[in-house]
Structures are given as structure tokens and as C-alpha cells.
Amino acid sequence: MNDETRINRVNRFISTLNQARELGLNATDAGEGYLVMELPYSDRIIGNPDTGVIHGGAITTLMDTASGSVMICGLDEFELCPTLDLRVDYMRPAEPRKPVYARAETYKITRNIIFTRCEAYQEGGETIANCVGTFMRIGKEATPKSYRDLITGGEE
Amino acid sequence: MTDPEILRYTQETGDFSRMMESIPYASWIGLQCDRFGDDLIFRLPAKEENLGNPILPAIHGGVIGGFMEMSAAIYLIMSQDTFRMPRIVDFSLDYLRAGLNRETYAECRLTRQGNRVANVMISAWQKSRSQPIATARAHFLLED
């Protein structure tokens, strides 16, 4: 699988998630076992109206989505993997009116569990948040074939 | 959230609508809060825009996280004698069941309040309190 296929699969996957679509999330880069996802700035996700800083919840959604999609870049076949847990450490507030990026990677894939790491940052800036997550592998058969075909886009 | 007038109004009346309206992210996901005596129950009504997994369908895990995180911050603000703005340090979230497309509830417990740091436990459920869909704990820095 090449990187373009990975980005396309991730973007097709997240376009089926209402909340990801509402936030305008999109994958900008991908490789074997990693991807970069962008969260555009929007007034709707402000947590502190005095400063315009976005709420941590939007960052959590960005990191959950990036971590929950990165297995697409680490597995040959598409599998939907529910989140078991997430741990997010917030280093600093995101600068207002700028997009936030999340770089996620699968650092260990076992038969049952996928372990992920993810870092949120802004252009030229420091780390905003770090996140580690674990995801359950329920097998590709747990997801309807029509949905899997939608994600792979009939590319094979 | 930082307007002292809105805070005073919320504390006196137990009506959280003005506070929620003042926080764009809270109104965007649809967060609501009700006070029963001293207890707060947070609510997240079903909303198509909050969905993730389209097959079940289920609420996006990030929205459940944001809902719990925001609930914990509001709970902390309301439990302080004087206004102190909580800043989240870390957040650890266990997903126990799929959050289906229906109303979700959350309650918080202050596990430990230090001089500068507070530890809060959050539990979220749909059908029954005894069957949580997610539990979380968070550390907040409290700033004067």
C-alpha cells in the first residue's frame, strides 16, 4: 500500500464520522504506521471566549480520531478498532486562529490490541498535547463488507 | 465561564443556561447541567453532529471525552468558594461501552483538592448509572 492510498483510506474513513466532518478534520500526510491530521480553527470550538483558545475536548477528538485511524496506515486490510482508553497530557493551550495538527503512530500492533502514540502541535510551535491510546482489534468481519469497501474505495 | 456576573447568577439560581451559552464549545456539543440540591448532573442530549461510528451508530469518543472534561471543569468551578479558573493538566479516559445515539449523563466527584491541583473522577452513563459507558479522571491546575 502506498502513502496516497493510506491518506485516501483515512480521509474516506473520517468522512463517515459526523463529528470529524463537523470539525473539518482531514489527513494531510501518512506513511507506514503513521499519519498527520489537521484540525482547522473555528469559533464554534472555543472553550475560553476571553482568549479564543479552543477547548481541550476538540483536541481530544482530534487525537482520538487520529489515533483511531492510524491503524489504517499500519494494517493491510481495513478494521474498525474501538477505543479502549486514551490518556491525554496537556502541555500548553493552542494558539487561537491557527490549525492544530496531530501526528499519530501505531507503536505496537498485536493480535488483539493496537497501541498508539499521538502528539498535537501547531506550525513551528511547541507540543500542545501528548496522547497514548489502546484500541481493541475486533476483526475485520465485525465491520460490514459494504462499509469496508467504502473505505478501501474499491482500489484493489 | 470567566464572567463573574454569569457565575453569580448560576450559583444563585441553579440555571446553567447562561453559563453554557457563554462557552461556544459547550453549546456546540449541546452540554446542559441540572442542579439537585448540591449535586450536579451533566447532560448531553442526542445530536447527529456528535456521532462517530456510523454503523452502530455511536457518539464519537472524542465528544464523550470533551463532554466529561467540560463537565469536570464546570463542576470544579462550582465547588470552589472563590472563583478560580481550572486549567486541565491531564485526562485519562476508559471507554467501557459504546455510547449510543441517545442522551448521555455525567457526574463528577472531587477525589482530592490540594492548594493548586485538584483531582476529579467523572462517570458517564446512558441507560443506567450502574452501567457506565466511560469513566475518566482528570487533574486540574487552579489559578487565582
Image (spheres, coloured by chain):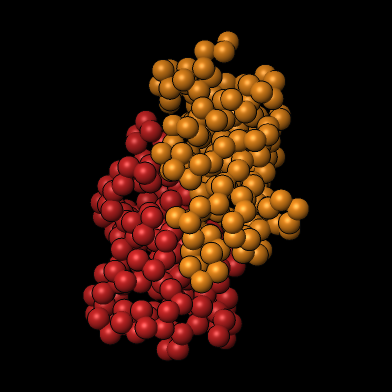
Specify the quadrant of the image occupied by residue B51: top left
Compare residues A40 and B56 and report the one nearer the observer.
A40
Compare residues B103 and B96 and report the one nearer the observer.
B103
Q: Determine whether, in the image, residue B45 is placed left or right of residue A125.
A: left
The residue located at (73%, 58%) in the rendering is A126
Chain B shown in which color?
red
**Where's the C terminus of chain B, which quadrant?**
bottom right
Q: Determine whether, in the image, residue B16 is placed left or right of residue A11.
A: left
The residue located at (56%, 25%) in the rendering is A9
The residue located at (50%, 23%) in the rendering is A151
Q: Position of residue A156 (x, y in %)?
A: 58, 10
Number of labelled discs?
0
Q: Position of residue A29 (x, y in %)?
A: 68, 34
Compare residues A3 and B2 and report the one nearer the observer.
B2
**Residue A33, above or below A140:** below
**Residue B8, above or below A98:** below
**Residue B25, above or below B16:** above
Q: Position of residue A74 (x, y in %)?
A: 65, 29
Specify the quadrant of the image occupied by residue A7: top right
Chain A shown in which color?
orange
**Where's the N terminus of chain B, which quadrant?**
bottom left
**Furthest-bottom residue in this view:** B81
Q: Determine whether, in the image, residue A151 is placed left or right of residue A88.
A: left
